[in-house]
Image (spheres, rainbow, N blue to C red):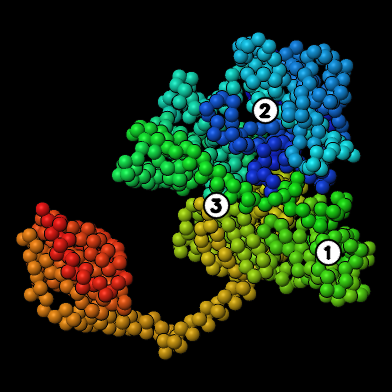
Amino acid sequence: MKKYGVNELRKMFLDFMESKGHLVLKSFPLVPQGDKSVLLINAGMTPLKPYFTGAEKPPRTRVSTCQKCIRTGDIENVGKTARHGTFFEMLGNFSFGDYFKREAIHWSWEFLTEVVGLDASRLYPSVYLEDDEAFDIWNKEIGIPAERIFKFGKEDNFWEHGAGPCGPCSEIYYDRGEKYGCGKPGCTVGCDCDRYMEVWNNVFTQFENDGNGNYTTLKQKNIDTGMGLERLAVVVQDVDSIFDVDTICSLRNLVSRISGKPYGVHHEDDVSIRLITDHIRSATFMISDGIMPTNEGRGYVLRRLIRRAARHGRLLGIEGNFLATLSAEVIDGSKDGYPELEEKKEFIFNVLTNEENQFGKTIDQGLRILADMEEAMNAAGEKTLSGENAFKLYDTYGFPLDLTKEILEEKGYEIDEEGFKAAMDEQREKARSSREVTNYMGADATVYDQIDTSVTTEFVGYDHLSFESPVTVLTTEAEIVDSLMEGQKGTVFVEKTPFYATMGGQVGDTGVIETANGKFIVEDTIKLRGGKFGHVGYMESGMISKGETVSLKVNVAARKDIEKNHSATHLLQKALKEVLGSHVEQKGSLVTADRLRFDFAHFTAMTAEEISKVEKIVNEQIQAGLEVHTDIMDVEEAKKSGAMALFGEKYSQKVRVVSMGDFSRELCGGTHVANTSSIMLFKIVSESGIAAGVRRIEALTGNGVLEYYKKQEALLHEAAKALKTTPSEMIEKITHLQGEVKALASENESLKSKLAQGALGDVMNQVVEVKGVKLLAAKVEGVDMNGLRDLGDQLKEKLGEGVVVLAAVNEGKVNLLAMATDSAQKAGAHAGNLIKAVAAIVGGGGGGRPNMAQAGGKNPEKAGEAIEAAAGILEGQIH
């Protein structure tokens, strides 16, 4: 048998399925689209759920994919064994009410034995014990003897996921030979050892589970096949584990080279090498789909993977940043199947390096916090770090439990692991309870789910702002209805609409829908599954009925303003790339009639000069009056033409490419001005950070800019009026006032100082000697902390050497100050400790350095008592 590589096997599978009439779709992004039930795509069928349920019509009834997937359920075991990994590719062939068991089983056998060339005598199918149909196909049609077909129960061979479509499975196992086995008598398919490896899983989706264990037969039966690409490569290449297959092995070897640690010599090193190899694959693919490291959701999954890899790099003795180097190897090994990796290369490296740098700082900070915790344990004579503290290190500083454990074990400490687990469970519970409850489709159930899937809408709003079309569906907020009456809220669906539905950051159109005897106000237009546009609003007068032809009129002024802002975001994105660099990637946008918001990947705040440059470039392109034109082209052709595509976005085969002269070219389904001169003006009003490595710009165009300057002008005149001057002379007036304020402040300080001295009187006769050290302790009225410090300096000067303690009663509170000169400190005086003890008497606290300290208290009536106590406290300090 030929030992095909990972990239060859992927192509062989997809070509084979194409030859059987399947439409080969590119892998969907790892970020689920419109599905809140999962954080990340975790199986080949997950992005296809709408086709399985019939909520959306598939592009063809036979589809095949190689889907990138991430599962982090057993992340703690990654590296510890050679079995576990977080990233994998799943080969799949799917039938949506087309072929069923017979074809699925025959093709799986044909592919494995004839295309890949696996030895048929080493392949063992399994079926669900009640599935006689599948058993007979294997036995009578494929010719597998009955004793080689394994029947398993629900646990193993029945796929279901709560309520929703489900069905029996048929898996195919491959006997890898005795060298991979456990050697126990009776070792066979189903044994936990690595000898019999499951390579193919056919799921026959034929039932619907109502969630209470009641099954009904689906009218549309589906096939969902999953086969792990890496697992297949393990079998074909006859290697020990996924870490030994060609592409992953070359990555693993690079980790060894960078760290100088050979693989297969020390168990601890192997754990780290495997973990880094796996995690950098996941991180590279996640970033290429637009996920950024953050502290929640999928961004947190990414941050955790990067930080775990970075930490294990430290354990292997790797100095400095290394993840981008490894990522380059991942890209090199996988770009055949995933060209987006190569396209986003620079960006991926930037994100990884930035996160590595941040983690470097965090780890050092965490080590300092851990050192403080050790000190506290020492002082208390304890030998166990509390679970709460261990969790704080984990949660706040990204310290995994094993890192904290490792550091402490070296010094003879332990960790309360049970306490850590309890804190972790509590946080998980909080996360679980805040997670949204969704249906099988991972979306909140709404009235729109009840609409027939064949209902769809054609958008005619690129060329029309008013249009006539028949009503296809009407709904209230709770049900589908035949008509809407005056005062009712609802949603109107028509065959063709000029109203743009919220998509790609552009908000939906508003306007009116009129009939011969009714008027419906459209407050928003939304896009729903299956290409349906819902006009959401209320009946202002009369009524509207299903089937009648209505007149749809978009609010023209609002649409025009939206178009100005949308076209400006295209100019803005290009200008940002020119000024900041090609790593700038759109992370999101919001285009309304009032303003535009643009989020983009960049790692530092923009300088005033950069903002000004970007603004200038955009305004130059507006003034240049660039023609804006749209071409419909093939997605690959569009990318070749240099059109900017959005990160992690799934495009259909035909796309709209919006070009603004030769300056900007982007894939975009939104509406735009015909010429950039219509935008008139562009003004950035704010630039801020919204997440790690993501900045946000808010800007205005056209009349919005004129309004903005009008408000600025009004503010300027108001300020000038308050300063009793004109706008042109404001700066001179402010400079003059600042000079006056400074002079008055200085005069004020000097008067305060005189007052303080007056309030104190001649206190030098209150100096006493405590064990040979001079002490001046006195009480004063109505002096604030600044005045008290000035007074202290003057008295210390007069005293020469010794200790000064002052208490000032001011507005019902006590301010305390202690100062100790060098010779007094040598004798044992410590201002910080002295003030702490004195403050306790007036019901307060504070502290400071040995030479100077201050404190406060809330019992002014005890200020005299505190001053009298100073001598005794000082006496205790002096040796």
Observer-nearest residue: 825 or 595?
A: 825
Q: Secondary structure at mark 3?
A: strand
Residue at the location (18% across, 58% down)?
A: 830
Residue at the location (59% across, 19% down)?
A: 240
Kind of residue at badge 1: Thr
Q: Residue furthest left?
A: 772
Residue on which the image places disc 2: 229
Q: CA distance from mark 3 to mark 1?
A: 41 Å
Residue at the location (79% across, 52% down)?
A: 529
Position of 364 compared to 503: left or right?
left
Position of 425 compared to 521: left or right?
left
Kind of residue at badge 3: Ala
Residue 550 against residue 177 in the figure, above or below: below
Residue on which the image places disc 1: 476
Residue at the location (37% across, 82% down)?
A: 734
Q: Secondary structure at mark 2?
A: helix
Quadrant for residue 538, please give it: bottom right
Q: CA distance from mark 1 to mark 2?
A: 48 Å
Observer-nearest residue: 737 or 674?
A: 737
Residue 468 against residue 10 in the figure, above or below: below
| Disc number for residue 601 | 3
Can I make out residue 640 in this image?
A: no
